[in-house]
């Protein structure tokens, strides 16, 4: 089991908790309503792959297995107590690397309220403290302006372009890589994000 898992994290009305099988109906409703909005950023598989889960239940069971093996943290994102998306810490590597990456999606109905930057800050701080990681990475398509705003607001450092990095929406897509190491936010990323939000308010 991964250190620091399972976990429940929150900041005001924004919460992260383990993704559950009983989230199925809420997950399907949000995904269905946001299908066209999410499709350009969704991972796809170039060839038929039996290892890829084809149902919600299979996805949750796979993510739980990864959590048990210490390779991931599958969070449900909630806003005011309602299911609003997902945030997954994946690719956790220990040893001399001590790193992982964050991927996320959010219901368009609540996007643009600072929810995702807050959720990413919560997860990043948890990874640096309780999970014991040193580095968090986020990879984003150059065309994904909303996700780019998340890492910009949080001050993730740009590490350049990865050509044809992931299979997204039916093709191999370039991604910009952003990262943050624990020593870059000694007081915590959430604390820094709170200060940034305060300075942006009129």
Image (spheres, helix red, strand yellow):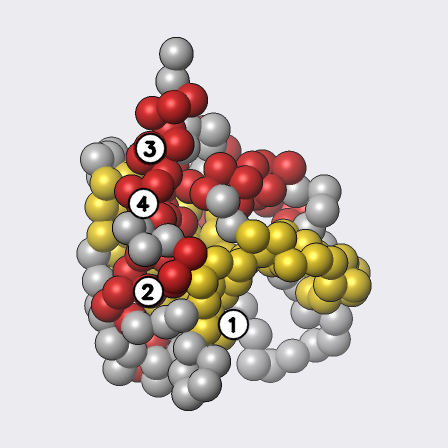
Between 39 and 140, the one lying in front of the other is 140
Circles 4 and 2, Cβ within 8 Å, touching? The answer is no
Q: Left or right of 172: which side holds 14?
A: left
Q: Earlier in the sequence, mark 3 or mark 4?
A: 4
Residue in the picture at 74% in, 75% down: 47
Q: Nearer the viewer, mark 3 or mark 4?
A: 3
The residues bearing labels 1 and 4 have C-alpha atoms spaced at a distance of 33 Å
**Secondary structure of the residue carrying numbered label 3:** helix
Q: Disc 3 versus disc 2: distance between alpha carbons?
A: 19 Å
Q: Are marks 3 and 4 in contact (CB under 8 Å)?
A: no
Q: Is residue 197 left or right of residue 10?
A: right
Which disc, if any, is residue 128? 2
Report the residue marked by disc 4.
190
Chain-order first, disc 3 or disc 2: 2
How far apart marks 1 and 2 lie (CA) works out to 29 Å
Question: In the shown orientation, is residue 48 left or right of residue 71?
Answer: right
Residue at 24% in and 35% down: 13
**Residue positioned 26% across, 65% down in the render:** 129
Q: CA–CA distance between discs 4 and 2?
A: 12 Å
Whether residue 99 is situated above or below residue 126 in the rendered picture = below
Q: Callout 4: few (<14), some (14-19), or many (20+) C-alpha neighbours within 10 Å?
A: many
Nearer the N terminus, badge 4 or badge 2?
A: 2
Q: Nearer the viewer, residue 194 or 4?
A: 194
Give the labeled residue for mark 1: 53
Mark 1 or mark 3: whose residue is earlier in sequence: 1
Determine contact: label 1, label 2, CB under 8 Å: no
| Tag 3 residue | 195
Q: Say whether residue 24 is visible.
A: no
Q: Nearer the viewer, mark 1 or mark 4?
A: 4
């Amino acid at each position: 089991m991964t250190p620091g898992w399972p976990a429940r994290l929150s900041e005001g009305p924004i919460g992260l908790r383990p993704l559950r099988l009983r989230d199925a109906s809420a997950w399907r409703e949000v995904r269905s309503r946001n299908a066209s909005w999410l499709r350009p950023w969704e991972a796809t598989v170039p060839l038929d792959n039996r290892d890829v889960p084809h149902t919600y239940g299979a996805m949750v069971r796979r993510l739980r297995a990864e959590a048990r093996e210490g390779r991931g943290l599958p969070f449900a994102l909630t806003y005011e107590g309602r299911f609003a998306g997902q945030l997954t810490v994946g690719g956790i590597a220990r040893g001399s690397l001590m790193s992982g990456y964050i991927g996320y999606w959010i219901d368009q109905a609540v996007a643009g309220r600072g929810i995702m930057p807050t959720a990413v800050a919560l997860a990043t701080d948890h990874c640096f403290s309780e999970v014991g990681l040193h580095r968090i990475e986020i990879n984003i398509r150059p065309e994904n302006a909303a996700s780019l705003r998340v890492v910009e607001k949080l001050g993730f450092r740009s590490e350049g372009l990865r050509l044809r990095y992931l299979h997204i929406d039916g093709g191999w897509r370039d991604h910009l890589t952003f990262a943050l190491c624990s020593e870059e936010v000694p007081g915590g990323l959430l604390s820094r994000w709170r200060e940034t939000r305060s300075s942006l308010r009129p």
